[in-house]
Amino acid sequence: MRAAIYGAGSLGTILGAYITKNGGKIELINRNKQHIAALQTKGATITGKVNFVQAVTAYTPDQMTGKYDIIFLMTKQQFNREVVTFLKEYLADEGVIVTLQNGLPEPEIGEIVGEGRVLGCTVAWGATMHEGGICELTSEPDSLSFSLGSLQAEEHPLLGEVKRLLELMGRVEIDQNFIGSRWSKLLINAAFSGMSAVLGCTFGEAAGNRSSRRIVQALIKECIDVCATGGIRIEPVQGKDIVKLLDYHNPIKKAISAFIIPIAIRKHALLKASMLQDLEKGKKSEVDAINGAVSAYGRKVGCPTPMNDRVVEIIHCIEAGEKRPSWENLKLFA
């Protein structure tokens, strides 16, 4: 059984270090030659909520050979068609691509490699890369968990092996309602990653400020509403029922929801959105696959999403150099 993490940046490097540290075999692959060189010579240095150094097997894509039974995909979703077409040649006949990505990537990947060769996985923790080979875990160790599943009814033959590898890092839940788990993660990303990128702050800062928290709350509400309209049941996250805690239909429940938001995100308060990290490097972000996905589904089912629409608009302006991540952008939601 041969496995790889393709797009081993901050999250993938930490996942690969944990898997290797705890006895698993996995290859880390990334186009960043400086990062791979550091991993090859010094190992993976994991800082933040944990601290350890782990020797890992790491390659650049041009160094890949042979076939893989399991490929964990952790690249940005906007490059999926190009990346997955490339990876198809390295996927074993009975192999599977596991999408540890944001948004709703499984349908497009299934079009390329076949629906039966795709498993989906949501990640409930965050990380930041500081320099080649050095990655910071920004979530608490007891929050290291994964939700694993498929958009197909039948169980994939490699599901158990994928689960075993992920369990070398944290808890793994097998979800029968995987689309509901996807929306749980999308809700969090749309609200907290969206505001982190717009304001240039951490998740905790976005939740802690009263004005930005109102926007976070509105973004969450829009996600809940489009799912309710479309008949999607949002799954709990780490045992917490997001809809029960944060949905509201009257002023009292709205006030309770606002009070809960900083508490709900406290284990990930130091998290800095990958969208923000991309914007700071002058790269295009995944906003169209996150807030844009909420807006697109809202249009499909006839449910307005003005706050998510505005996040997409602001981040596109930042990408174009017309604005920058700043608390000044709060006034654009007025």
Image (cartoon, grey):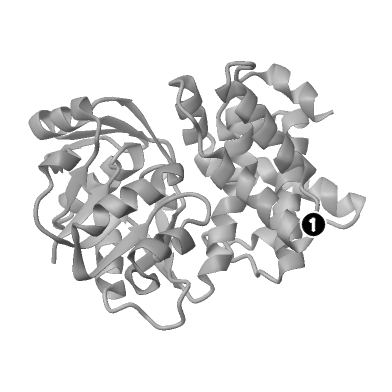
Q: Which residue is mark 1?
A: 303
Residue ID at (16%, 50%): 20
Amino acid residing under circle 1: Cys
Nearer to the camera, 294 or 328: 294
Evaluate whether residue 217 shows in this view: no
Nearer to the camera, 284 or 111: 111
Residue placed furthest toward the right:
251
* 100 to 9, vertically: above or below: below
Left or right? Give the position of 304 relative to 189: right
* 252 to 2, vertically: above or below: above
Evaluate whether residue 192 shows in this view: yes
Left or right? Give the position of 296 relative to 334: left
Q: Residue 222's spot in the image, x, y percent?
A: 75, 51
Q: Quadrant of residue 244?
A: bottom right
User: Which corner quadrant holds the N terminus?
Assistant: bottom left
Residue ID at (48%, 63%): 107
Residue ID at (72%, 45%): 219
Q: Quadrant of residue 110?
A: bottom left
Q: Residue 274's spot in the image, x, y percent?
A: 47, 35
Query: Tag 1: Cα neighbours inside 10 Å, few (<14), some, or many (≥20)?
Result: many
Residue placed furthest toward the bottom:
154
Left or right? Give the position of 97 relative to 198: left
Residue ID at (31%, 73%): 159
* 160 to 312, vertically: above or below: below
Q: Quadrant of residue 298?
A: bottom right
Helix or strand or loop: what does disc 1 sit on? loop
Q: Residue 192's spot in the image, x, y percent?
A: 61, 39
Q: Residue 31's spot in the image, x, y percent?
A: 24, 35
